[in-house]
């Protein structure tokens, strides 16, 4: 082999006692990594040792009060429903649409499909849809309303096994400080439970017709828009009121809510189911206004202007005004009714409040300067004229 056939030696061959540049780079990276780790600059996932989740501490049994609250909710919630008020509208193509006008809460009254809610929940719509706790929707028929008490009754054709009526309690023996539980659909949030106590009793609020609802329950259980019409329960899970209003400058919960007491509900609802409205008691007479009595110089008592044919008043012996042969007028003035003194027309309505059709009450008339004591059986108001007592 000639010298020309021998390959030349590489010029990059490391000389004895020297370090290659690649090794230097590796050493620099290692040193930098150590410094960054010591400085805490590496992300957690880069750590060589994995971090295990913490072990769960056993909770133990729930408190008895918690168990009771859970049981109340689980028992009552199947009987609470979501109500959507619907209004009929037509689009530009004259198609009929049913659009939501508002939502609220209601509850199952019986296994016949009757649903109780507030009047103001359904007043804006032409129809309503009821959604049960199992999320099945049902078309609802309006059975009756009592705007003066802010109550309404709907009916759905659901089978009895889907209907879970809430047990009925009483509001006559409630005490301030009792625990209460409200279930409803505030802001569209389905099946919400709030708790609190009875903060006050015997409150008065205005109904949708500006009539006074008396004996109202005040509670600090949170009641918000959408809770209206839902049940207020006692610690036994019984219905003691229907959540109907809040006192709040902003329109949302401010710690003061009101519920129509169940004793009123239990009086109104059966009448709505049977008659579609409340049968208010009347006397079967037309009364003169207070201004008429004043012009005639009548200082006390209410003047009877007309007695309806066949009415309770006629049967009791009440007489309309008449003129005798000498031209002198004779009047019957109601001065006492059901044991209450009568001075003006509103006193007659107050005396009949809480009375029922068919009930017999004492009636005292002032006739020709002498008192005449009678007994009168109260009749349905619709048989009387518009100005009849108890309107």
Image (cartoon, helix red, strand yellow):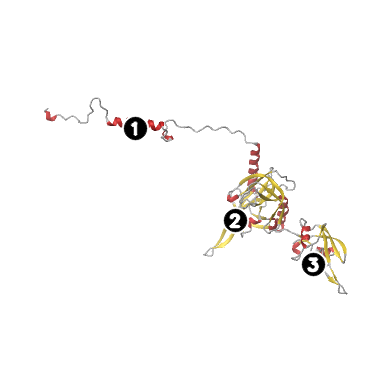
The 10 Å Cα crowd at callout 2, few under 14, some 14 to 19, many 20 or more, is some
CA gap, disc 3 and disc 1: 109 Å
The quadrant where residue 74 appears: top right
Give above or below for 81 relative to 298: above
Callouts 2 and 3 close, C-beta under 8 Å: no
Q: Which mark is residue 29?
A: 1
The quadrant where residue 311 appears: bottom right
Judge by depth and name the residue closer to the eye, 323 or 301.
301
Most extreme residue toward the bottom is 326
Residue 274 in view in this figure: yes
The 10 Å Cα crowd at callout 1, few under 14, some 14 to 19, many 20 or more, is few
Of callouts 2 and 3, the N-terminal one: 2
- Residue 265, horizontal then vertical, whole percent: 71, 52
Q: Please give left or right for residue 258 compared with residue 351 in the image.
A: left
Q: Please give left or right for residue 19 compared with residue 293 in the image.
A: left
Of callouts 1 and 2, the N-terminal one: 1
- Residue 390, horizontal then vertical, whole percent: 76, 61
Element on which disc 1 rests: helix
Q: Which residue is mark 3?
A: 294
Residue positioned 39% across, 33% down in the render = 36
Frontmost of labels 1 and 2 is 1
Residue positioned 29% across, 31% down in the render = 22
């Amino acid at each position: 082999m000639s010298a020309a056939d021998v390959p030349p030696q590489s010029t990059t061959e490391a000389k004895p006692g020297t370090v290659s540049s690649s090794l230097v780079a590796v050493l620099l990276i290692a040193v930098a990594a150590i410094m960054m780790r010591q400085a805490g600059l590496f992300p957690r996932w880069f750590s060589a040792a994995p971090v295990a989740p913490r072990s769960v501490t056993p909770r133990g049994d729930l408190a008895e009060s918690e168990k009771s609250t859970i049981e109340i909710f689980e028992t009552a919630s199947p009987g609470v429903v979501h109500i959507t008020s619907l209004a009929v509208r037509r689009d530009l193509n004259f198609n009929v649409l049913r659009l939501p006008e508002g939502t609220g809460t209601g509850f199952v009254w019986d296994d016949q499909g009757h649903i109780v809610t507030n009047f103001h929940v359904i007043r804006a719509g032409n129809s309503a849809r009821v959604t049960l706790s199992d999320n099945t929707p049902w078309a609802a028929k309006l059975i009756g309303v009592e705007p003066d008490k802010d109550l309404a009754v709907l009916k759905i054709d659901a089978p009895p096994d889907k209907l879970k009526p809430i047990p009925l309690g009483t509001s006559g023996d409630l005490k301030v400080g009792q625990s209460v539980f409200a279930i409803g659909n505030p802001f569209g949030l389905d099946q919400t439970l709030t708790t609190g106590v009875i903060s006050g009793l015997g409150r008065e609020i205005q109904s949708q017709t500006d009539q006074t609802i008396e004996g109202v329950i005040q509670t600090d259980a949170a009641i918000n828009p959408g809770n209206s019409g839902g049940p207020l329960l006692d610690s036994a899970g019984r219905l003691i009121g229907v959540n109907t209003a809040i006192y709040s400058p902003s329109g949302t919960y401010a710690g003061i809510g009101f519920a129509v007491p169940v004793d009123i509900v239990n009086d109104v609802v059966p009448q709505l189911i049977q008659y579609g409205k409340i049968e208010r008691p009347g006397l079967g007479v037309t009364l003169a206004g207070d201004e008429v009595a004043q012009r005639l110089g009548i200082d006390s008592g209410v003047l009877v202007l007309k007695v309806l044919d066949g009415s309770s008043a006629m049967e009791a012996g009440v007489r309309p005004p008449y003129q005798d042969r000498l031209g002198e007028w004779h009047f019957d003035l109601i001065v006492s009714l059901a044991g209450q003194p009568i001075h003006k027309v509103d006193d007659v309505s107050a005396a009949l409040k809480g009375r029922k059709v068919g009930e017999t009450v004492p009636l005292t008339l002032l006739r020709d300067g002498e008192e005449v004591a009678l007994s009168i059986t109260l009749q349905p108001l619709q048989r009387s004229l518009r100005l009849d007592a108890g309107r």
